[in-house]
Amino acid sequence: MSRIIALIIVLIPGIMAAYGIKLIRDLFFGILQPPIPSLLIQFLIGLTLFIAGLGFTAGFIFYRDRKHNKVQKRFSRR
């Protein structure tokens, strides 16, 4: 059960990051998504979603690896 919860915790920010990449990609092709009024705002929303999703996923994996002592010495707790 805990593995399923962990998968869901990692999956939701991963989907956010993927949607952020999609918004940025649509900017380069000039496709404006309906609720967003301009391409610049679409880029900023996409960049924010991508950075937040990637940062949360990376932080979650780093925290889990640190808990199981699978990181280098300089990253381990003192």
Image (cartoon, grey):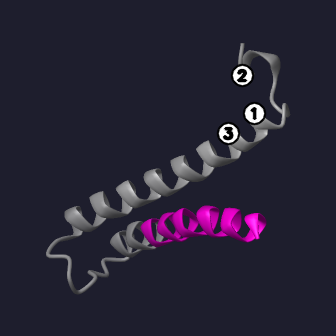
Q: Residue at x 38, y 71 (%)?
A: 23
Instruction: Residue at the far top: name it.
Output: 78
* Along the line of sight, the residue nearer the viewer: 48 or 40: 48
Is residue 28 a member of the stretch shown in magenta? no
Mark 1 crowd level (few <14, some 14–19, many ≥20, 10 Å Cα)? some
Split into 4 quadrants, where in the image is the N terminus?
bottom right
CA distance for labels 3 and 1: 5 Å
* Horizontal and vertical percent position of residue 25: 44, 70
Q: Which residue is mark 1?
A: 66
* N-terminal label among 1 and 2: 1
Q: Which residue is mark 3?
A: 63
Number of the front mark, 1 or 2: 1
Specify the amino acid type for callout 2: Phe
Q: Residue at x 14, y 76 (%)?
A: 37
Instruction: Residue at the far left: name it.
Output: 37
Q: Is residue 24 left or right of residue 37?
A: right
Q: Secondary structure at mark 2?
A: helix
Q: Which residues are magenta?
A: 1-20
Q: Secondary structure at mark 3?
A: helix
Q: Which residue is mark 2?
A: 75
